[in-house]
Amino acid sequence: MEIKRLEVGYFENNCYVLICPQKRESVIVDPAAEAKRILQQTEKTKVHYILITHGHMDHIGALDEVKKHTGAPVGIHPGDARALKKPPDFFLEDEQTLSFGDVSLKVLHTPGHSPGGVCFLTGKILFSGDTIFPNGPGNTAIPGADQKLILESIHAKIFILPEDTTIYPGHGLETTVGREKATPFYPLPQKTTGGQG
């Protein structure tokens, strides 16, 4: 699989174009901005899906234009679907498998940064949206976010992956599962216990 990372827009988002070189089919992950640049990277391929890691505006700014030019179906988790101007073509679900060409992507629901946040896993490659970055989890100081929940998502869904799994985040450069596990930035969420109050 070919991976094309495009840093686009004011917030320097990563949009990823994934290409199966054998079948010349592609997937666009998070068409954040600069639709023309994104579409140029899909030339001579059939865009099979447009996949959204979460519904924050800085990740979907070019969605309508990219959808208009490709006609590809749009998928987002139902927890974030109301962020879109139009209903998605399908909903993403935890453990769901999506295929294009000879490539399969597994959907991991990783709420915390947003209720419907997801990651996409293929082999030892993870596209993490804003769930996890180099040196820390996604921002939870925003409406609808939950720090405990994002840490639970990271420990339960990401830190169980092989340590040499490469993480391609929604902003910034890639990292690995092993590198992030070795940092102090992901404390285990404290279990709540019953008590007075």
Image (cartoon, grey):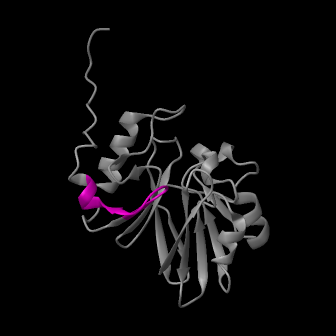
Percent from the top left, x then y, of residue 172? 45, 57
Does 121 sit left or right of 68 as displayed? left
Farthest residue in the left direction? 182
Task: Tell whether position 157 is magenta.
Answer: no
Rendered position, 115 above or below 64: above
Q: Is residue 168 magenta?
A: yes
Q: Nearer the viewer, residue 110 or 38?
A: 38
For image coordinates 70% across by 59% down, the residue present is: 63
Q: Position of residue 58 (x, y in %)?
A: 61, 49
Residue 2: give x, y in percent of width and height: 49, 80
Exactly how many numbered labels are in the figure? 0
Which residue is depicted at the point 20% across and 53% down? 182
Q: Position of residue 164 (x, y in %)?
A: 26, 68
Residue 87 in view: yes
Which residue is located at x 26 percent, y 65 percent?
162
The residue at the far top in this view is 197
Is residue 94 in view?
no
Closer to the camera in the image, 167 or 91: 167
When asked about the image quadrant of residue 158, the answer is bottom left
User: Which residue sits furthest front?
Assistant: 10
Which of the pair 81/7 is nearer the observer?
Answer: 7
Left-right relation of 107 to 194: right
Please determine whether, in this image, residue 23 is positioned above or below residue 12: below
Quadrant of the snapshot with the C terminus: top left
- Residue furthest out toward the bottom: 22
Residues rendered magenta in the picture: 167-180
Indicate whether 96 appears above or below 195.
Answer: below
Residue at image position (60%, 82%) is: 25
Q: Quadrant of residue 165?
A: bottom left
